[in-house]
């Protein structure tokens, strides 16, 4: 066991974690942040993606102990405190980019990370940003459209 301190969705947490405890389990089982999904458990599907210091990581491959001293963002941390959805979340709804929703938290976080770096991503950059996450429902077209829509709206807000 080891004691860690990390920031999760803007709040500092002090936790005692097991040596082999995975980040996905810490988030889901211990903190109740069940928006982070587990699909394959071996780093293939991307459903468990969270942002570690702003970078997408597969939380099934990261130990909880590795979060020590770092900043984690999960899908629960994206909306405003009053519940207003982030533009990326709203764009996914408006573009019809959600079917079963299992991949959606990961897709949204990957899009958020991309748009944090550029508000004018090319389609290739969007495809690359979501390439680590599998969607078995949408065929990806609406997801790409949603990210383009979010970028367009965020450009307008930033003017
Ligand atoms: S559950 Fe982590 S990559 Fe599939
Ligand atoms: S919406 Fe079902 S896996 Fe993507």
Image: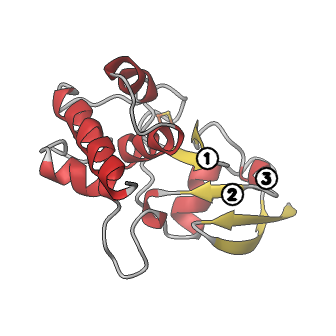
- Depicted 13 relative to depicted 137: above or below: below
Q: Which residue is mark 2?
A: 71
Q: Position of residue 46 (x, y in %)?
A: 45, 34
Q: Position of residue 142 (x, y in %)?
A: 17, 34
* Label 3, residues with CA under 10 Å away: few <14, some 14-19, many ≥20: many
Q: Which residue is mark 3?
A: 65
Q: Quadrant of residue 40?
A: top left
**Mark 2 and mark 1 residues within 8 Å of each other at the beta carbon:** yes
Q: Quadrant of residue 18?
A: bottom right
Q: Residue at x 57, y 70 (%)?
A: 31
Q: Which mark's residue is nearer the viewer, 1 or 3?
A: 1
Q: Residue at x 44, y 65 (%)?
A: 76
* Label 1, residues with CA under 10 Å away: few <14, some 14-19, many ≥20: some
Q: Which mark's residue is nearer the viewer, 2 or 3?
A: 2
* Label 2, residues with CA under 10 Å away: few <14, some 14-19, many ≥20: some
Q: Quadrant of the N terminus?
A: bottom right
Q: Residue at x 44, y 46 (%)?
A: 112
Distance (Cα) linking label 1 and label 3: 18 Å
Q: In what element is the residue under mark 2? A: strand
Q: Which residue is mark 1?
A: 54
């Amino acid at each position: 066991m080891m004691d860690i301190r990390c920031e999760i969705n803007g709040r500092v947490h002090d936790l005692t974690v097991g040596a082999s405890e995975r980040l996905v389990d810490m988030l889901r089982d211990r903190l109740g942040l069940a928006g982070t999904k587990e699909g394959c458990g071996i780093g293939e599907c991307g459903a468990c993606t969270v942002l570690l210091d702003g970078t997408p990581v597969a939380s099934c491959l990261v130990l909880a102990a590795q979060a020590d001293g770092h900043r984690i963002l999960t899908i629960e941390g994206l909306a405003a405190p009053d519940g207003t959805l982030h533009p990326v979340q709203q764009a996914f709804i408006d573009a019809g980019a959600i079917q079963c929703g299992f991949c959606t938290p990961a897709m949204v976080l990957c899009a958020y990370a991309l748009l944090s770096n550029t508000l004018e991503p090319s389609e290739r950059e969007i495809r690359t940003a979501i390439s680590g996450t599998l969607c078995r429902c949408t065929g990806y077209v609406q997801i790409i459209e949603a990210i383009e829509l979010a970028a367009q709206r965020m450009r307008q807000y930033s003017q």
